[in-house]
Amino acid sequence: MSIDLVKLFIPSTFGFAVGILITPIITHYLYKYEMWKKKAGKIAPDGRATPIFNELHKDKEVGTPKMGGIVIWGSVLITIALFWILSHIFPTGILQKFDFLSRSQTWIPVFTLMFGALVGLLDDYLDVRGSNDHISGGLSLKKRILIVGLIAFVCAAWFYFKLDVSGIGLPFDHLIPLGVFFIPVFVLIVVALYSGGVIDGLDGLAGGIFASLYAAYAGIAYYQNQLDLAAFCALVVGAILAFLWFNIPPARFYMSETGSMSLTVTLAVVAFMTDSLGGGYGVLVLPVIAFPLLITSLSVILQLLSKRLRNGKKVFLVAPLHHHFEAVGWPAYKVTMRYWIISIVLATLGMILAIIG
């Protein structure tokens, strides 16, 4: 087996193992300090009540901790640090090849993962501590979008000014030149992808979907010979699978904002890393690969527009879309498994499209 392929699977395996090992410690503290909402339910983005959702989930939100995303990004950061330290302790030999922390490929994804995780963690903490008398006590949606936009702006500026990226790749080595407008387009895509993070609503749903998304980009990066980036994506997959081991029904904890924010923002950055910078068009296939996130976000937008423009009439019984299926009578596990299947198929299709172009 090629050493390059080994470099892809070793971090993923280590990430899974680290996640399995640290989860009991994290779980202990999450339950010890009761890091769950004290009042079940949520409020829609337009400020209205969500009675159908609240009825479906009245017994699920209280008593199950949030912040399970710590397992994911914690496993990733610990594994990266471990390989970096070992490569410097033993600067020669095979361990040197497994150090995939590089300025050209992984600094930006690691940066976005860390900042997204910390902001999400703050939101989760405020949500838990502020829900004693209210349904939600976290950062407002406007504040979260603003913060995500700022993170995206910093990354976009780095791409534009430091890496000389000013366009989006097309098949057969073509390019859509954007000039300075590359920066707002970058920010818009990151925010749009982040909005799909509301897919974290059923046990195991978000974990299975994000694993397939990052696996697809690991394959794309590997094909582009961006081995460090491919190893990073594979590591994220391993960490997500460790989280998923404990998140399948009944969930021991929920991914919540610290997981979904870090994963969505970082995924957008990875898409741009595999675009013109990598000689491909990772952004163009993003709507295919991340279609479950896209349709989730669109379902919320359609619901809000319908209620505003049609005197309160709704398109779905409840949004996002996966909760609509739940409301019409599908068991939660059926919704989750079918989303997994669709996600794997579309992620595979998107990866193929990115490679054959």
Image (tube, grey):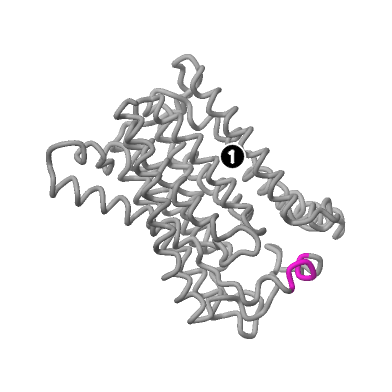
Q: Tag 1's secondary structure?
A: loop
User: Magenta region: which residues?
Assistant: 53-58
Residue 90 visible from this viewpoint: yes
> Which quadrant, please, contains the N terminus?
top left
The residue at 46%/54% (across/down) is 262
Q: Is residue 13 left or right of residue 132?
A: left
> 260 or 206: nearer the eye?
206
- In the image as oriented, which residue stretches furthest toward the bottom? 133
Residue 321 visible from this viewpoint: no
Question: Measured along the vertical axis of the image, is residue 28 above or below residue 307?
Answer: below
Mark 1 neighbour density, 10 Å: few (under 14) some (14–19) many (20 or more): many
The residue at 12%/38% (across/down) is 92
Q: Is residue 348 left or right of residue 315?
A: left
- What's the magenta bit mostly, secondary-structure-wise? helix
- Find residue 17 and report its horizontal and vertical position in percent: 40, 53
The residue at 50%/58% (across/down) is 259
Q: Is residue 57 magenta?
A: yes
- Find residue 23 and report its horizontal and vertical position in percent: 45, 64
Instruction: Say which quarter of the image contains residue 203.
Output: bottom right
- Find residue 189 and report its horizontal and vertical position in percent: 53, 42
Looking at the rendered structure, the kind of residue marked 1 is: Ala
Instruction: Say which quarter of the image contains residue 234.
Output: top left
Question: Measured along the vertical axis of the image, is residue 231 above or below residue 316?
Answer: above
Reading the image, the residue beneath label 1 is 290
Q: Is residue 25 left or right of residue 247?
A: left
- Find residue 207 and report its horizontal and vertical position in percent: 56, 52
> 42 or 31: nearer the eye?
31
